């Protein structure tokens, strides 16, 4: 089947790599308003030339195009996703599905109108440690879930690299992952949130977005969760990402450390590094859970399984994140909109 990619930045490049290398996918086009960016992404991550487009109408008219992934910046998912869905194409949208509930609902409506599949790329659902945690809960090995703690933060280097950081935040960029994975593992929706944010450090660097968020969440059963997401870890941190996840149940617990687990340490004259072992560097094969999630979209399009995360699940995450922002503004607990 013929696949296309919209958005040729960091994650768009991974989509290009995945569809180019998958034996059951043919990459037939890459769309980005920045032609040079798209051409460079194709040159670096595709094994053969792929046409580049800057006009979405022309892109959607590619002969035989059946499935499209949208990997534009967080706040720019809605317009291309709606266009793709209304054209009847199968649609993959990078997380978060959208940054407003209204946009998320519009994407779902367009997908239903067009008749294609809709998958949200919450790729931590195939990240091995989280799959183990999910199975431990399903098997009853930890009993009833009582508490979840999730921390996913980046060094200030990441926020400085993202050109559109001022239009997003660590909430959309990082918390979207952990809110989804916590609801997926626990098997319950988050229904109430109380949140705070701090600003200043990034503003001083010309990045108009909060430094960090801390959230207290309540699940349907009454279980509690605490989420911590920052974009101001020091640049000298051994890893650009800090990810910790803990779950406490009535009969057991789960502890996950995917970034400072010291599986591999590299010591040099001026630095200590913990190389990522779950997300290996770009290579010639489909390796690592990020690319495996994209392969699951290919499988779903071919009718070989379900999508990794549905549009409805993506809408639920967006509703939680919007409630967090409402809580910060109101200074009190906020109920999550039922979707």
Image (spheres, grey):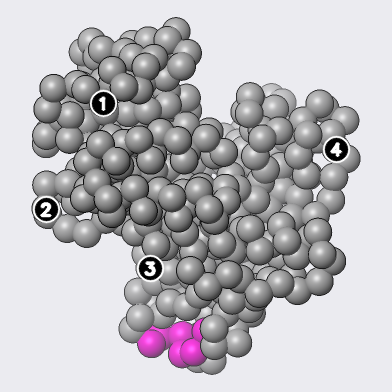
- Name the residue located 57 percent from the left edge and 79 percent from the top edge: 219
Mark nearer the N terminus (2 vs 1) = 1
Q: Which residues are magenta?
A: 140-145
Residue holding disc 2: 303
Nearer the observer, 77 or 226: 77
Asked if the residue under mark 4 is in contact with the one under mark 3, i.e. CB atoms within 8 Å, the reply is: no
Nearer the observer, 244 or 277: 244
Quadrant, the N terminus:
top left
Residue holding disc 1: 60
Label 1 neighbourhood size at 10 Å, few (<14), some (14-19), many (20+)? many
Asked if the residue under mark 2 is in contact with the one under mark 4, i.e. CB atoms within 8 Å, the reply is: no
Please, what is the dominant secondary structure of the magenta stretch?
loop
Considering only vertical position in the picture, is 19 above or below 171?
above
Q: CA distance from mark 1 to mark 3?
A: 39 Å
SS under mark 3: helix
Question: 57 left or right of 152?
Answer: left
Q: CA distance from mark 3 to mark 4?
A: 36 Å
Residue holding disc 3: 132
Mark nearer the N terminus (4 vs 1) = 1
Nearer the observer, 195 or 326: 326
Nearer the observer, 167 or 305: 167
Please tell me in which quadrant of the rendered image residue 50 appears. Answer: top left
């Amino acid at each position: 089947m013929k696949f296309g990619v919209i958005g040729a930045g960091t994650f768009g490049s991974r989509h290009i790599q995945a569809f180019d290398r998958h034996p059951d996918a043919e990459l037939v086009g890459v769309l980005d308003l920045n032609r040079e960016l798209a051409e460079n992404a194709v040159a670096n991550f595709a094994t053969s030339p792929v046409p580049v487009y800057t006009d979405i109408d022309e892109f959607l008219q590619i002969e035989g195009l059946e499935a499209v992934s949208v990997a534009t910046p967080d706040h720019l998912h809605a317009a291309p996703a709606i266009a793709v869905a209304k054209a009847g194409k199968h649609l993959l949208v990078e997380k978060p599905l959208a940054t407003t509930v209204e946009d998320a609902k519009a994407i779902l409506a367009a997908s239903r109108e067009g008749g294609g599949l809709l998958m949200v790329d919450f790729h931590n659902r195939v990240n091995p440690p989280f799959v183990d945690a999910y199975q431990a809960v399903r098997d009853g090995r930890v009993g009833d879930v009582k508490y979840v703690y999730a921390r996913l933060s980046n060094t200030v280097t990441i926020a400085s690299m993202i050109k559109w950081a001022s239009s997003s935040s660590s909430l959309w960029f990082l918390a979207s992952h952990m809110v989804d994975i916590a609801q997926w593992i626990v098997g319950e929706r988050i229904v109430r949130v109380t949140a705070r944010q701090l600003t200043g450090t990034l503003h001083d660097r010309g990045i108009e977005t909060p430094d960090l968020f801390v959230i207290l969440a309540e699940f349907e059963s009454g279980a509690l969760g605490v989420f911590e997401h920052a974009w101001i870890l020091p640049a000298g941190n051994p890893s650009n990402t800090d990810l910790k996840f803990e779950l406490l149940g009535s009969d057991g617990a789960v502890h996950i450390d995917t970034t400072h687990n010291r599986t591999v340490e590299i010591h040099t004259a001026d630095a200590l590094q913990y190389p990522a072992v779950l997300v290996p560097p770009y290579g010639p094969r489909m390796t690592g859970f990020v690319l495996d999630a994209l392969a699951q979209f290919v499988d779903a399009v071919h009718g070989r399984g379900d999508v990794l995360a549905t549009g409805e699940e993506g809408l639920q995450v967006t509703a939680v994140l919007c409630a967090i922002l409402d809580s910060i503004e109101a200074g009190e607990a906020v109920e999550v909109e039922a979707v």
